[in-house]
Amino acid sequence: MYTGYVITAIKIDGLRHMALNNDGSNTHKTKESAQQQLDNIIAINSPETIKQTLGTDLRIATVQCYDHGDAAGTVF
């Protein structure tokens, strides 16, 4: 296992979850890489689209990841 970085959001249930699917393409080995993905999401989507599809209050969080890249947990 290793410490990775993911984009998180507050979902409709009021809890902070991973904003994107839990697979290796959405976990990052560096905070900078995760921030770049977040910046890209914000650049090409309207705030309303982000709110409807991902949630609110997007942030980068650390997470333990399995060697194949999936996050060991998805609620923060």
Image: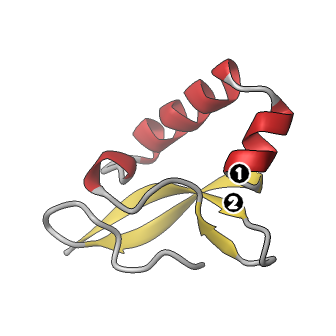
At 85% from the left and 37% from the top, the residue drawn is: 48
Query: Which secondary structure lies at badge 1?
Result: strand
- Residue matched to label 2: 9
Q: Quadrant of residue 3?
A: bottom left
- Quadrant including the C terminus: bottom right
Give residue 7's mark: none
- The residue most toward the left is 67
Q: Is mark 1 in CB contact (under 8 Å) with mark 2? A: yes
Task: Indicate the position of residue 12 as horizontal and vertical percent values.
Answer: 79, 69
Dot 1 surroundings within 10 Å: few (below 14), some, or many (20 or more)?
Answer: some
Residue 19: percent from left, percent from top: 59, 56
Asked whether, in this view, residue 65 is left or right of residue 60, the answer is left
Q: Residue at x 71, y 51 (%)?
A: 58
For label 2, the SS is: strand
Q: Quadrant of residue 10?
A: bottom right
Disc 1 marks which residue? 58
Q: Say which label, 1 or 2, has the lower sequence index.
A: 2
User: Quadrant location of residue 16?
Assistant: bottom right
Q: Using the image, determine if residue 75 lies above or below residue 36.
A: below
Q: What is the crowding at mark 2: few (fewer than 14 residues within 10 Å), some, or many (at least 20)?
A: many
Residue 35 is left or right of residue 3, and the answer is right
Q: Residue at x 35, y 70 (%)?
A: 71
Indicate whether 29 appears above or below 76: above
Residue 21 falls left or right of residue 47:
left
Q: Amino acid at mark 1?
A: Leu
Q: Amino acid at mark 2?
A: Ala
Disc 1 from disc 2: Cα separation: 5 Å
Q: Nearer the viewer, residue 26 or 49?
A: 49
